Image: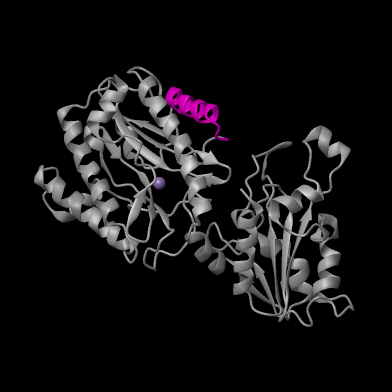
């Protein structure tokens, strides 16, 4: 991605900052796993969105006065030792090129504390702000009642300067990230193309008697062979009754002849993600009953996609999906009363998609051009061993929508043909 995108993101964020304030974003670090091992590093998404850098232990500092705004990037200093053990670190020039931040403003992370004290906070002669009033931080909480990481990390500031108000940067960034630029949509489309290559290969490869984990491995192999860095969330390969567990990730059962397989798979393109579900019969032929249920889910998927346009609320989509699944399952006698649908359909129909698979942004505002969301109705009939979900990734446009995953086959006939 070109640095001008990240320059634009910073400019827009800064526009939303109050005068006399500063913001600090940390790129994160690989969490500890066991003994001397760590998990794979994932860049903090807000940090990436503002810098384009995917490196741990970097810090972005934004300073806004009444007549100026400046960005500073603090990076890990390259060293021979780090190069030999972990790989080459970015140089200041490279970090400057990636982020579009002035080379003079790229510093080493060891300098961060003293730089903040002297340049931003203290009344030193070189201070940038007369009297900073606000500090914006990423205050995302992954569950209730945990102290956000950035707050713990910057306690050295909030303790010494209690007069500075800590503000959440998330409202600003969530609403920015909810609307994708054309560059971002292109990145998501590339992620979807990787996913398509993987899913279609799995459909051709799958045979009765295989284990779910074989399809899981084959998918990952295929997306990596086509250029993706890998999966963007734990793969779901669920056969028969397993498919009625929404987040089934064991993927360790033998797939019985005659059963359906539900795939819910993501692929990474850089930091952007795809999220596609398809369901298919392991032996290449839908039974009449499977076809009947499949068609209901497919019709719902198409109907909801057609509803998508600026002004529509995601909740309208949720209600319409539930209503349609209720009416159709009543028609075939699966349920008698409306409320019984809760037994067979128990999740929302959409979420946003972008840098995160479940991307940020409010659901209390109507859809706007640039929003990318999933459409994923399903039916899960445990007593029949049938679980079906069909999921596409859709962009809201000025006049309606564009289904970004349209080319991934979902008609039952096309799926059977692909498997021949
Ligand atoms: Mn999804």
| Number of on-image labels | 0
Q: Which residues are magenta?
A: 213-229
The percent coordinates of residue 263 (x first, y second) are 38, 34
Does the image show residue 171? yes
> Secondary structure of the magenta portion, mostly?
helix
The percent coordinates of residue 318 (x first, y second) are 29, 57
Q: Is residue 391 left or right of residue 143?
A: left
Q: Residue at x 81, y 55 (%)?
A: 109
Q: Is residue 44 highlighted in magenta?
A: no
169 in relation to 307, above or below = below
Which of the image's four quarters has the C terminus?
top left
Q: Nearer the viewer, residue 204 or 403?
A: 403
The percent coordinates of residue 184 (x first, y second) are 52, 52
Q: Is residue 120 left or right of residue 251?
A: right
Q: Nearer the viewer, residue 203 or 417?
A: 417
Q: Quadrant of residue 387?
A: top left
Q: Is residue 7 left or right of residue 318?
A: right
Q: Residue at x 45, y 25 (%)?
A: 213
């Amino acid at each position: 991605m070109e640095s001008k995108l990240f320059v634009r993101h910073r400019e827009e964020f800064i526009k939303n900052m109050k005068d006399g304030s500063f913001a600090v974003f940390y790129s994160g670090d690989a969490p500890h796993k066991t003994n001397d091992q760590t998990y794979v590093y994932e860049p903090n998404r807000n940090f990436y969105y503002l810098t384009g850098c995917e490196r741990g232990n970097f810090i972005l500092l934004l300073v806004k006065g009444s007549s100026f705004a400046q960005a500073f990037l603090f990076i890990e200093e390259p060293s021979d030792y780090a190069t030999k053990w972990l790989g080459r670190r970015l140089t200041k020039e490279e970090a400057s090129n990636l982020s579009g931040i002035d080379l003079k403003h790229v510093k080493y992370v060891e300098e961060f504390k003293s730089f903040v004290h002297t340049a931003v906070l203290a009344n030193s002669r070189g201070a940038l702000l007369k009297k900073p009033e606000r500090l914006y931080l990423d205050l995302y909480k992954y569950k209730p009642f945990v102290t956000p990481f950035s707050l713990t990390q910057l306690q050295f500031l909030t303790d010494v300067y209690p007069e500075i108000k800590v503000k959440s940067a998330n409202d600003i960034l969530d609403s920015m990230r909810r609307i994708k630029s054309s560059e971002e949509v292109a990145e998501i489309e590339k992620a979807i193309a990787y996913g398509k290559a993987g899913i279609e290969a799995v459909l051709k490869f799958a045979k009765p008697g295989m284990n779910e984990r074989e399809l899981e491995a084959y998918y990952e192999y295929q997306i990596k062979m086509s250029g993706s860095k890998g999966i963007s969330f734990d793969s779901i390969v669920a056969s028969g009754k397993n498919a009625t567990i929404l987040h089934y990730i064991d993927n360790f059962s033998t797939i019985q002849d005659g059963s359906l397989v539900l795939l819910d798979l993501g692929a990474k393109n850089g930091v952007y993600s795809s999220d596609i579900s398809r369901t298919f019969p392991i032996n290449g032929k839908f039974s009449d009953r499977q076809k009947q249920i499949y068609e209901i889910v497919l019709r719902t998927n198409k109907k909801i996609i057609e509803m998508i346009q600026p002004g529509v609320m995601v909740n309208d989509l949720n209600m319409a999906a539930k209503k349609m699944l209720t009416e159709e399952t009543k028609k075939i006698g699966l349920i008698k009363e409306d409320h019984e649908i809760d037994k067979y359909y128990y999740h929302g129909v959409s979420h946003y998609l972008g840098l995160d698979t479940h991307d940020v942004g409010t659901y209390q505002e109507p859809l706007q051009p640039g929003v990318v969301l999933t459409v994923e109705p399903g039916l899960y009939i445990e007593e029949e061993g049938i679980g079906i979900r069909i999921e596409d990734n859709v962009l809201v446009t000025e006049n309606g929508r564009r289904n970004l995953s349209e080319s991934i086959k979902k008609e039952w006939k096309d799926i059977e043909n692909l498997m021949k």
